[in-house]
Structure formats: C-alpha cells, structure tokens
Image (cartoon, rainbow, N blue to C red):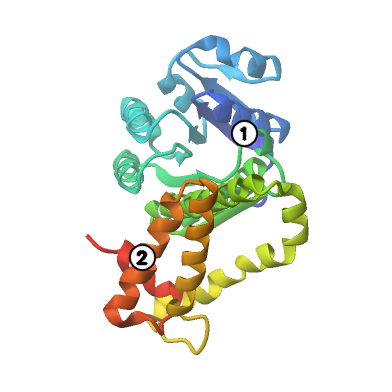
C-alpha cells in the first residue's frame, strides 16, 4: 500500500485463525482493512465474520481475493504447504509470513514465494495475542524492503513497533529466538533467586522493590557486552571473570545449606572456572560467548 492508498484500498487475506491469527485479523478489521479469512475449521472464523470479514472456502480462494497474504499457522512446514498449494495465485502479491519456525523455514518459504512471483516478508511477533494492534507491540520483519515500505501502514496496524531489520528473512527469526533465549535465562535466574529468598522467609515483592535500581542496571550491560563480542576484545580493567568465582561459590554454599536446587549456579560456576583455567581470568564475562559458540 503506497502512502496515498487508504486501508480500504488494500485487501488482506489471513490464513490461520488460531489465537494469534484471530488477533491479527481483528486488528486489521479494526484498522478498516478489507479482510478475507481462512481456517481449517470454519467455526473459528465466525466472530471475525460478524465483525465484517469474508470467509473463504480454501486458502487459494483467500489468496486470490487479496493484495497482501498474511500466514499464521502451526509451524513453518505448514505455512509452506499452504503457500505451495496456492501456487500461481501468489503472483503479484505480497506474502507476510508470521508463522513461528526456524531460520531455515523462513529462507525456504521466501524462495518458494519468490518462485511464484510474489514479494516475501517474514515477521517475528514479539508479543502475546491480546497486545496485537497496540502501539507498543513489536514485530521484527525481514525480506523485501519494498514490500515493507509499501505496506507499512498495514504492518503497523498489527504492531506499532513494526521494525524492518534485514533483507534476509531469516534474521527476524534469529532476533526473536535471541530475545527468548535471554528471557528464559533471566526468568530462570529470577526464579532460582526467589526460591532462595523464599526459603529465608523473605517476600519476593519486597526484594524486587528494594533492588529495582540494581536489577534495572543489568540491561545496561548488554550494549557493552555486545561491543566486546563484536570486537573480540575481552580484556577489561575491572569486573573480570576471576572476581565472579567467589560470589558463585557463596551462592552455591547458601543454596546447598538451604536445600535449593544448585544445577543453574553450578553450571554457571563451571563456565567461569573453565575460562579462568584456560587463562581468561582477567577478561570480561563476555569471553564466555566462546563456550556457547563451540560445535
């Protein structure tokens, strides 16, 4: 959609009406777009039809009615099968694949779509379904920049923080995985700490309130660590790996004495100890990226 086109001038098909697909279709309807929907079980479409969507009998019929085709189904292989079945009907359209999968799936589906004469964008949704359409909802996009620019208003109707990150459609997938990877590490650390504090009879809410400045400061470390990793310059004058070991030993001893699971801190200690043994005791914590990069 060009900057001079209205929402009504762009017809959209949404393939897949699970929790997320239904939220995507609803956001587009709220934005004034003409929406055709398809789902294997048609009953999922009834609330959207009541809001003004048109129900297609087949995926190919839905594609044929649209300028932009949005796919959100269970798995990259399923998305590819639906688009493959549409075949020549894809020609001249823009496909926005919002299906979870691997970077390999995104690359392969992009090639499939291009072979049928359509533009391809892969998007990685970084929010839950109820937040779709909100100004703060983040979606990373990669692939055809021209398609992103042409349909930017539509994409921002799905998430106000729609961000084009690369012409490679695999990149948003990797960005999404990386954010989740960090999230799980943070959550596991917090839950281990909560078990330790709870065992000591301390309220987790009080801890979170009193330590908020310290916890908030942790995110400020990421740009610094990223710079060290990109430059492979790990030598630092303070906060070196060797200084982490005594604190890890204290955490392990406290956990042992209180009967708290020690797998997580034990793993961290082994990473730090191995790096020190290898002669990296004066380096930044970012040096441990080499461990995770091993094959």
Nearest the eye: 80 or 255: 255
- Kindly identify which residue carries mark 1: 129
Q: Which of marks 2 and 1 is in front?
A: 2
Q: Quadrant of residue 19?
A: top right
Circle on res. 259: none
**Within 10 angstroms of label 2, few (less than 14), some, or many (20 or more) residues?**
some
Residue found at the far bottom of this picture:
237
Please give the name of the residue rendered at 60% of the width and 18% of the height, measured from the top-left corner.
54
Instruction: Measure the C-alpha gap from mark 2 to mark 1.
Output: 37 Å
Please give the name of the residue rendered at 54% of the width and 22% of the height, measured from the top-left corner.
37
Q: Relative to residue 23, is residue 175 depicted above or below?
A: below
Nearest the eye: 194 or 87: 194
Nearest the eye: 143 or 292: 292
Q: Position of residue 39 (x, y in %)?
A: 49, 18
Q: Where is residue 245 in the image (x, y as percent from the top left)?
A: 45, 72
Q: Position of residue 68 (x, y in %)?
A: 51, 37
Q: Where is residue 10 in the image (x, y as percent from the top left)?
A: 60, 36
Nearest the eye: 122 or 214: 214
Element carrying mark 2: helix
Please give the name of the residue rendered at 54% of the width and 57% of the height, measured from the top-left corner.
254
Instruction: Report whether 150 appears left or right of 79.
Output: right
Q: In which quarter of the image is residue 230?
A: bottom left
The answer to whether any part of residue 144 appears in the image is no
Q: In which quarter of the image is the N terminus?
A: top right
- Kindly identify which residue carries mark 2: 271
The answer to whether any part of residue 197 appears in the image is yes
Q: Number of marks in the image?
A: 2
């Amino acid at each position: 959609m060009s900057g001079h086109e209205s929402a009504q001038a762009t017809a959209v098909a949404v393939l897949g009406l699970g929790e997320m697909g239904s939220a995507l279709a609803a956001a587009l309807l709220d934005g004034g777009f003409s929406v055709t929907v398809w789902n294997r079980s048609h009953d999922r479409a009834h609330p959207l039809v009541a809001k003004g969507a048109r129900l297609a009998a087949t995926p190919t019929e839905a594609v044929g009615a649209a300028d932009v085709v949005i796919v959100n189904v269970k798995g990259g292989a399923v998305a590819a099968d639906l688009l493959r079945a549409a075949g020549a009907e894809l020609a001249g359209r823009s496909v926005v694949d919002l299906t979870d999968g691997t970077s390999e799936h995104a690359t392969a589906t992009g090639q499939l779509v291009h072979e049928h004469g359509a533009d391809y964008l892969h998007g990685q949704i970084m929010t839950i379904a109820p937040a779709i359409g909100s100004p703060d909802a983040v979606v990373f996009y990669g692939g055809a920049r021209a398609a992103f620019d042409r349909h930017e208003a539509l994409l921002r109707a799905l998430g106000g923080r729609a961000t084009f990150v690369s012409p490679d459609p695999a990149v948003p997938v990797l960005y999404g995985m990386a954010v989740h990877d960090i999230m799980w590490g943070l959550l596991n650390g917090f839950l281990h700490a909560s078990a330790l504090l709870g065992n000591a009879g301390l309220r987790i809410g009080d801890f979170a309130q009193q330590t908020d400045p310290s916890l908030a400061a942790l995110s400020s470390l990421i740009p610094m660590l990223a710079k060290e990793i990109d430059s492979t310059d790990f030598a630092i004058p303070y906060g070196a790996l060797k200084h982490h070991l005594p604190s890890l030993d204290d955490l392990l001893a406290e956990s042992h004495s209180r009967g708290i699971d020690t797998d997580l801190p034990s793993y961290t200690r082994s990473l730090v100890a191995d790096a020190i043994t290898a002669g990296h005791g004066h380096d930044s914590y970012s040096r441990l990226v080499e461990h995770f990069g091993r094959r």
